């Protein structure tokens, strides 16, 4: 029996051509049912990942229980336990949660991690009755999240122009410093000294250099020649 | 029983085997399969009884992988494993737990007896001796025939010999080492098959026509088929990357049996490899040119002197006292990192030929076919292996991607040479 499309001779057991996928049909040939391998008999996947993730979960439970009793024991009141509990939970979300998934996608997990950070900071702000969350922590966190997520997504999915992305991000980080200083002045009543312009200028120079190199291929080649290792 | 347990044989992993346990990962275990297809359906009970006897004769192959403080080792099995049923694809993942209990499997399906070995146990040669003897024992028990001790069949009732379980690498290591520096090869890619399913495609060709053609190209069958495979790789890369200057080197890893160079009866790993390469950026290659590249590369490297240097390089690493004293978990991490960065980047794929399989005359009436199937690489999607038995060459492709791209190109190469090919696969959807 031959495949009508690619012309290869097929074993009688084949229902489709293994090379081009064309269905084989011949009304007069009695089909041999001897299949090379049994159909639809898949091995059950071992629970290896679930086991490891479960073990890590238990590992994280230990410090929670220890701190709970350490806080509870002397005066029967929970005071500092919630801070450590939140911290351990945050560490779990960032480190161990992706382990449950077969192919954890950083583009999804990274924003989630930032949100978890934000919730934890809000929680501390609430417990300490502070007033720094809305005016300082939230905007700074949002700025860092924006830059890292954009950087990650662009580096992951863009094939070219990585120098532009990195250069732009470095300038963005410089801008973040200015934002931080201004928010500090606003929130904590500190005098504005303009220290944030130093990192801004140096980072802008570095970022600008990278973008210049991205544009100018001759200069890039020269630099590559000097710093190869 | 306790005393017997104490007396179980154990062996250190041989030089080549040491990397495999460390290189394993959660969805990839380095195993390969050899199988024999008989004329009649396999009787599982008799097969189990034959296996019980055979495992005692091959203590280094019928073993389990255990951890020591500094190295892995192989521990002889007390009893043979159960015969397993076949799944929809060969070489299903072998977990740590399974390897700890028994590092090989025997699978019966219809007329076929298949054995899947973890590569640390033995190489293709040792595996073939094991399979032949298992089949011989099975045939003797089932049909009451008497099979002479020739063509690799040995006396299963005899005690295992020391020379069969020795690690031959240190014995034949040369006085000086050689640089391992090598270029990277083109990396095949494609849409990964879901659920860990492995696609198997088998090409069957007539030995005589293949040999005649190989001789016309002034090459052996291994060289000629390897050349066809490299040609298919060149064409596949051309299809995926038409810009010739962006193409990468085509390199094929061809394992070679060191027993042909050094006197040895070992049933452990004792093979090395050679990697012929061509650079498509230099222009179009004819099949004759590729044949010549392979022939000359093998001529240079497949010599006892060159191989003794390569062996010396590998052996010197394991002899290093610092390396030996590092605890196993840390050693594993380091070896894994080295393997990931170096191991599989030096060739596009493996193409292993265990050659012409011969059996004692009386067995030929009962055995129809042999197959040899390599597992896929950890990071690249294809591997292929071949053997010839009676008057047929069997070339098995295994892949973990959806499209049979390489098989198509390989078929085109064979078609242009007017070789009659029959294909079959393990994909049988309606």
Image (tube, rainbow, N blue to C red):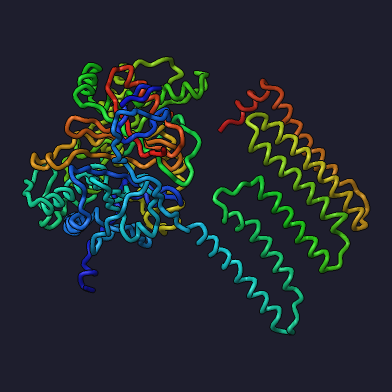
Which residue is found at the position 37% from the left and 26% from the top?
B277
The correct choice, above or below, for A120 with respect to B394 in the image is below
Judge left or right: residue B21 versus residue A185: left
The correct choice, above or below, for B256 with respect to B143 in the image is above
The spot of residue A189 in percent (x, y) is: 93, 57
Q: Is residue B107 visible?
A: yes
Judge left or right: residue A138 versus residue A9: right
Which quadrant of the rendered structure holds the C terminus of chain A? top right
Among the 4 quarters of the image, the one containing residue A17: top left
Which residue is found at the position 10% from the left and 56% from the top?
B158
Judge left or right: residue B351 versus residue B181: left
Which quadrant of the rendered structure holds the N terminus of chain A? top left
Among the 4 quarters of the image, the one containing residue B351: top left
The correct choice, above or below, for B209 with respect to B358 in the image is above
The spot of residue A81 in percent (x, y) is: 72, 73
Q: Is residue B56 visible?
A: no
The spot of residue B66 in percent (x, y) is: 34, 60
Q: How many numbered markers are drawn?
A: 0
The spot of residue A227 in percent (x, y) is: 61, 31
User: In terms of depth relative to the viewer, which is nearer, B286 or B36?
Assistant: B36
User: In terms of depth relative to the viewer, which is nearer, B69 or B87?
Assistant: B87
Residue lying at the far front of the rendered structure: A27
Which residue is found at the position 43% from the left and 15% from the top?
B283
């Amino acid at each position: 029996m031959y495949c009508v499309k690619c012309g290869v001779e097929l074993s009688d057991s084949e229902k489709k051509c293994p090379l081009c996928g064309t269905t084989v049909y011949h009304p007069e040939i009695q089909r041999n049912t001897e299949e090379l391998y049994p159909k639809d008999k898949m091995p059950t996947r071992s629970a290896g990942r679930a086991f490891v993730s479960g073990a890590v979960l238990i590992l994280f439970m230990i410090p929670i229980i220890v701190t709970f009793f350490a806080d509870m024991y002397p005066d029967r009141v929970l005071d500092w336990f919630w801070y450590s509990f939140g911290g351990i939970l945050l560490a779990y979300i960032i480190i161990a949660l992706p382990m449950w998934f077969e192919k954890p996608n950083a583009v999804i997990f990274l924003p989630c991690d930032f949100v978890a950070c934000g919730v934890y900071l809000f929680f501390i702000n609430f417990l300490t009755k502070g007033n720094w969350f809305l005016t300082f922590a939230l905007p700074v966190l949002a700025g860092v999240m924006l830059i890292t997520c954009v950087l990650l997504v662009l580096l992951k999915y863009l094939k070219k122009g990585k120098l532009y992305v990195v250069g732009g991000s470095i300038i963005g980080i410089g801008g973040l410093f200015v934002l931080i200083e201004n928010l500090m002045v606003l929130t904590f009543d500190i005098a504005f000294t303009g220290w944030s312009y130093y990192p801004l200028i140096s980072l802008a120079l570095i970022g600008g250099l990278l973008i210049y190199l991205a544009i100018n291929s001759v200069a890039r080649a020269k630099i590559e020649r000097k710093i190869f290792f | 029983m306790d005393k017997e347990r104490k007396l179980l044989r154990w062996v250190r992993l041989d030089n080549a085997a040491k990397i495999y346990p460390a290189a394993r990962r959660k969805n990839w275990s380095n195993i390969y399969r050899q199988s024999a297809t008989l004329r009649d359906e396999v009787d599982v009970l008799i097969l189990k009884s034959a296996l019980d006897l055979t495992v005692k004769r091959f203590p280094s192959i019928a073993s389990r992988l255990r951890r020591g403080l500094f190295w892995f080792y192989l521990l002889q099995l007390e009893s043979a494993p159960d015969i397993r049923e076949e799944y929809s694809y060969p070489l299903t993942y072998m977990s740590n737990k399974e390897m700890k209990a028994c590092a090989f499997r025997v699978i019966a399906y219809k007329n076929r007896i298949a054995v899947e070995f973890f590569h640390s146990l033995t190489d293709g040669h040792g595996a073939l001796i094991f399979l032949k003897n298992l089949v011989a024992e099975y045939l003797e028990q089932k049909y009451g025939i008497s099979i002479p001790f020739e063509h690799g069949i040995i006396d299963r009732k005899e005690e295992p010999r020391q020379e069969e379980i020795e690690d031959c690498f240190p014995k034949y290591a040369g006085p000086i080492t050689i640089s391992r520096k090598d270029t990277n090869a083109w990396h095949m890619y494609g849409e990964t098959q879901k659920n860990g399913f492995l696609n198997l495609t088998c090409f069957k060709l007539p030995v005589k026509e293949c040999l005649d053609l190989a001789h016309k190209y002034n090459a052996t069958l291994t060289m000629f088929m390897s050349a066809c495979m490299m040609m298919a790789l060149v064409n596949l890369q051309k299809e995926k990357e038409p810009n010739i200057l962006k193409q990468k080197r085509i390199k094929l890893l061809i394992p070679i049996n060191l027993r042909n160079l050094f006197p040895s009866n070992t049933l452990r790993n004792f093979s090395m490899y050679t990697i012929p390469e061509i650079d498509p950026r230099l222009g179009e290659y004819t099949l004759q040119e590729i044949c010549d590249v392979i022939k000359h590369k093998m001529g240079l490297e497949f010599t006892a002197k060159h191989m003794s240097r390569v062996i010396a390089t590998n052996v010197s690493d394991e002899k290093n006292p610092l390396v030996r004293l590092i605890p196993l978990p840390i050693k594993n991490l380091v070896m894994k990192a080295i393997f990931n960065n170096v191991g599989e980047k030096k060739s596009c794929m493996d193409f292993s030929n265990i050659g012409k399989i011969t059996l004692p005359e009386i067995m030929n009436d009962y055995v129809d076919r042999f197959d040899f199937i390599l597992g896929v690489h950890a990071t690249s999607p294809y591997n292929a292996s071949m053997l010839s038995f009676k008057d047929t060459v069997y070339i098995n492709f295994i892949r973990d991607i959806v499209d049979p791209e390489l098989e198509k190109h390989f078929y085109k190469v064979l078609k242009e040479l007017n070789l009659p090919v029959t294909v079959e696969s393990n994909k049988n959807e309606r």
